[in-house]
Image: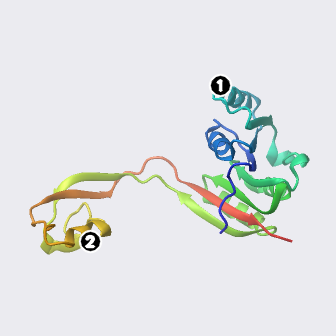
Amino acid sequence: MKAVKVVPGCLVLESGTGSGSLTTSLARAVAPTGQVYTFDFHEQRAASAREDFERTGLSSLVTVGVRDVQGEGFPEEFCGLVDSVFLDLPQPWLAIPSAGKMLKQDGILCSFSPCIEQVQHSSETLRSNFTDIRTFEVLLRTYEVREGKMDSSQGDEGDSLGSLPCKRRQRLSEGSNQHETSSSPTAMAKPSGEARGHTGYLTFARLKCF
């Protein structure tokens, strides 16, 4: 899979400006000579984001537009000129055909969706003009870390908090002066039993070369 093209000098389109946090990261990545055009269908939200970019000094890198990309597509003026497109929309498959027209050959599309059904529908649409379609789950996983004791006779399964990471175990076993007794305290970790928040999915695809 080819890496997402977000480097200095790139032209990037985004739909679903929201709070502008991703837009800010994109602007910093394409600086000083690139440009990010971001669109949101909600006029008040777009105006708020525009004010934020002016206040943070990013207005020279970011242009905010009010547009329903799902219904209207991206502006035709960007056709074939864009390095990457980012979608954060409830129905991204409606914007994918337009995004394909905007991208340069080998351009990259990235779509964020909170539900796997959205991913499935988007992937079906992507197959027409895109390749290297891959999806990654974005899941916040908290770990509990505390000091504990592990009996060497119990091996990797000896403590309810889980065993030491492989590299940690290797370091402890190397060298004559790095021996731990069975009663020596050590940092133990395990995934938290309670998962808070919602997962999400990032789908990447590369425009086919025709």
Q: Residues within 10 Å of mark 1 (few under 14, many from 20)?
A: few
Q: Position of residue 171 (x, y in %)?
A: 25, 68
Residue appearing at x 73%, y 65% in the figure? 206
Q: Residues within 10 Å of mark 2 (few under 14, many from 20)?
A: few
Colour basis: rainbow
Q: Residue 93 lies in what quarter of the image?
A: bottom right
Q: Quadrant of the C terminus?
A: bottom right
The vertical placement of 2 against 72, above or below, is: below
Q: Position of residue 154 (x, y in %)?
A: 16, 73
Per the image, the residue denoted by label 2 is 170
Q: Position of residue 147 (x, y in %)?
A: 19, 53
Tag 1: residue type?
Answer: Arg
The vertical placement of 33 against 106, above or below, is: above
Looking at this rendering, what residue extends furthest in the right direction? 76
The vertical placement of 138 against 153, above or below, is: above
Q: Secondary structure at mark 2?
A: helix
Give the Cα separation between the discs numbered 1 and 2: 50 Å
Q: Quadrant of the N terminus?
A: bottom right
The vertical placement of 118 against 178, above or below, is: above
Residue appearing at x 71%, y 51% in the figure? 86
Q: Position of residue 44 (x, y in %)?
A: 73, 27
Q: Secondary structure at mark 1?
A: helix
Per the image, the residue denoted by label 1 is 55
Q: Are marks 1 and 2 in contact (CB under 8 Å)?
A: no
The answer to which of marks 1 and 2 sits earlier in the sequence is 1
Does 207 sit left or right of 80 as displayed? left
Residue appearing at x 68%, y 52% in the figure? 6
Tag 2: residue type?
Answer: Gln
